[in-house]
Image (cartoon, grey):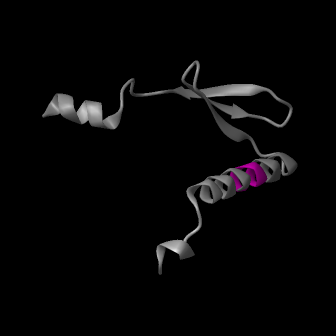
Amino acid sequence: MRRGDYISDEAVVKRANEAVRIELEKKRALDIPVVVYDSETQTIYHENTDGSRVEIGKRMWKERYSERIAKKA
């Protein structure tokens, strides 16, 4: 395939975001809890369709993978 035959990066991002939005709507319609990550508190939640949240975990690492590997080497 030639480079001109590929879709742009913006189109890929738009399609991915739309796929996530559709999946979230489907889970809400089926009354299935959605897993949500809060980047401010670095906590993982199950969010129910009524808006309530149940904490299921915290972020395990505070740095990037490449930073952890560099420390070991």
Q: Identify the residue at the far left of this view.
A: 73
Say which residue appears at 57% left-offset and 18% top-offset: 41
Q: Is residue 20 covered in magenta?
A: yes
Percent position of residue 50, x then y: 86, 32
Magenta span covers which residues?
A: 19-23
Image mark count: 0
Q: Residue at x 68, y 53 (%)?
A: 14
Which is nearer the eye, 16 or 58? 16
- Screen quadrant of the C terminus: top left
Dominant secondary structure (helix, strand or loop) of the stretch shown in magenta: helix
Closest to the observer, 53 or 72: 72
Residue 72 to residue 18: above or below: above
Horizontal placement of 1 versus 31: left or right? left
Task: Residue at 59%, 67% (x, y): give it.
Answer: 7
Above or below 41: residue 15: below
Q: Residue at x 57, y 25 (%)?
A: 39
The image position of residue 18, as x and y in percent, is: 73, 53
Q: Please state the horizontal and vertical placement of residue 8, each as a whole percent of the image.
A: 58, 61
